[in-house]
Amino acid sequence: MEFRHGVCLEELCPVCGDKVSGYHYGLLTCESCKGFFKRTVQNNKKYICAENRECRIDVSQRKRCPFCRFQKCLHVGMRLEAVRADRIRGGRNKFGPMYKRDRALKQQRTALIQAGGFRIDSGPPLGSSTQQRDLTFTGGLHPVPILHCTPLPTTLNDRISYQPPSLCSLLPSDSPGVNQYQCSSSNWTIKSEHVNNAAAGIDSDELYSRPLSPRGPRMPHLVMEFMRCDPDELQLQNKITARLLQEHTNWEKHGNPSTFGLMCLMADQTLFAIVEWARTSIFFKQLKVNDQMKLLHSCWSDLLLLDIISRQVLYGKEGSLLLVTGQEMELSDVASHAGLTVASLVQKGQELVEKLHIIKVDRQEFACIKFIILFNPDAKQLEDHQFIESVQEQAEGALLEYTLCTSSHLLGRFAHLLLCLSELRSLSALAEDYLYGKHLSGEVLCNNLLIEMLRAKRSWA
DNA sequence: ATAGCCTTGACC
DNA sequence: GGTCAAGGCTAT
């Protein structure tokens, strides 16, 4: 049976929702989608959608539109290059280690859930430090389907190691290596080595264009670069969950953290991920460490908030807060248990999420916004101010170009996004002040990156 | 054409 | 020798 390998019982095929039978062509899928993908690529099939290329694919409907089914296969991350051009049977391919790693991470996650601790669904007070042991992990963690649809982790970003919580120690080492499996989860950058894939269901040209607007123009080059730097959501989820699992061993010694403490730990780990993203990102790599530190010190809370907000917009459900670990909290519980400040912050955040959700901001746009935030020329005492300003302008230009390509409302969408960005900045300033207050009253756990960031800005502000 | 089951073979 | 993701076969 498929479960003998530790594959989760609840694991569903990201294409059609059927029962998963194992790893196929890059990720866990069902037997039928495996076969469908193989037939399509091997036989160089071309399909046409009779509707408008957005057919729903599920177990009962998957046979109705092969075009949309194949699109979805690609969209969720099935790899063309895993279909063998030579048709030689048996053996292993280069994805083997990736499958193994993914399995290990999934197991870690399961262990974390079962480890005792966390209960997120029943509303413990958020931000209340008076409550002890108010979060417990239970098996009740809801897998978020979309997160299981994203491509598997790369080995590059899976170096799960605890590093000293100092930004300085995180920055100087350069590791520009791009993993061989690294492939942006963006639909724009699917590449394949298979000889016959050029027109398998969609034209090769369409492989590089927006699937929902196939006749649309190509994505601006810089947006593509930004997407290449953008970490994969599932990978992030696995990494942070794994790190929290390591933290869990400390909890046994010192008692479980409060909900607020747990949120700080998550924020802290997310900050590590943000630093890692910046450190390996285009343009940022070229900066001197001093400037890198100054930029991160100046915008960390904006990036952290954007990370949370974008997760809600892209993958979240209405009425709940999707955590970086993939777990969900009921917003009503949060609101009813939190103090006034937190409740107001959550409320404002929710409003911003709603705004961005309505205009359907996508990953590409979020990727641009992240760079606009990171390359903040207003950060103090920058050495290479001119370069940083020019990168921000380029990022804004890329976002503008992208929105013009994808939206018929001309400048409206771009302006709207910038407006939302300024709202995000003022909200993150409020959140940062709140956290700083908590820190001063000794309620934020010590010795972490979050605290370094909180202190840094004040030390030279 | 689909999808469940079978065979193969590199890697552990 | 076992595992398990490739490709193959075949009833539907």
Image: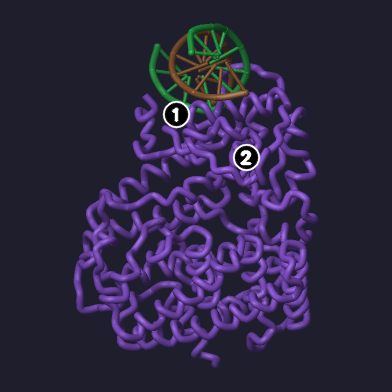
Chain colours: A purple, B brown, C green
For disc 1, the neighbor class at 10 Å (few under 14, some 14 to 19, many from 20) is some
Q: Residue furthest front?
A: A51
Tell me the quadrant of the picture where the C terminus of chain A can be found. bottom right
Image position, residue A159 (x, y; %): 51, 51
- Looking at the picture, how far across and down is residue A385, in whole percent? 74, 83
Name the residue carrying label 1. A21
Q: Are marks 2 and 1 on the same chain?
A: yes
- Left or right: A38 as drawn, with respect to A203: left
- The secondary structure type at the circle numbered 1 is loop
Q: Nearer the viewer, residue A116 or A396?
A: A396
Is the residue A455 above or below the residue A216 in the image? below
Measured from the top left, where is residue A211 in percent x and y? 68, 49
Q: Is residue A219 left or right of residue A59?
A: right
Q: As shown in the figure, which amino acid type bears the numbered disc 2?
A: Cys
Residue under mark 1: which chain is it in? A
Disc marking residue A106: none
